[in-house]
Amino acid sequence: MRFEDEDFYIDLVFYNYKLKCFVLIDLKLGKFKHQDVGQMDTYVRLYNEKYKAADDNPTIGLLLCSEKSEAVARYSVLADQKQLFAVKYSPYLLSEEELQAALAVQRQEAMWHLSGKE
């Protein structure tokens, strides 16, 4: 995407017809960093300004990272933005046992947050 004298490179761009918005996806190897959040925030703002139609919903930015950082997610602009998300992904296919273990951990964390014991 070109804006004024600067080029920006987004990994994937989709338009979701049901949500009626653009979805920008940036794939990151390594630990999730605050620079990644700032970069995606810039992409979302530029896309909203350049490509979003008046009847479209705000653009969604999704960061897929191979390592998560709870501190960056909690204290960055992600905490305030409703259309920016960061998600951990695995760069390889998990075994069935690893997948079941990961789901059990996520389910336990979700129950912990729902119980209000944060």
Image (tube, helix red, strand yellow):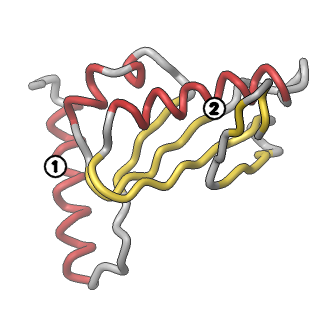
Closer to the camera in the image, 115 or 92: 92
From the top left corner, tell me how far across and down residue 55 is, in percent.
Answer: 89, 22
- The circle on residue 7 is none
Which residue is identified by label 1?
108
Using residue 24 as the reference point, say whether residue 28 is left or right of it.
Answer: left
Using residue 56 as the reference point, say whether residue 81 is left or right of it.
Answer: left
| Label 1 vs 2, first from the N-terminus | 2
Using residue 17 as the reference point, say whether residue 62 is left or right of it.
Answer: left
How far apart marks 1 and 2 lie (CA) works out to 34 Å
* Three-letter amino acid code at the position of disc 1: Gln
Closer to the camera in the image, 35 or 113: 35
From the top left corner, tell me how far across and down residue 57 is, in percent.
Answer: 76, 25
The residue positioned 47% from the left and 27% from the top of the image is 38
- The circle on residue 43 is 2
Number of marks in picture = 2
The residue positioned 41% from the left and 19% from the top of the image is 77
Closer to the camera in the image, 98 or 23: 23
* Three-letter amino acid code at the position of disc 2: Tyr
The residue positioned 31% from the left and 38% from the top of the image is 33
From the top left corner, tell me how far across and down residue 20 is, in percent.
Answer: 80, 35
Q: Quadrant of the N terminus?
A: top right
From the top left corner, tell me how far across and down residue 9 is, in percent.
Answer: 65, 46
Check the image and name the residue furthest to the right: 54
Q: Quadrant of residue 75?
A: top left
Check the image and name the residue furthest to the left: 117
**Badge 1: few (under 14), some or many (20 or more) residues near its Cα, within 10 Å?**
few
* Residue 14 vertical placement versus 33 (above, below): below
* Residue 110 vertical placement versus 116 (above, below): below
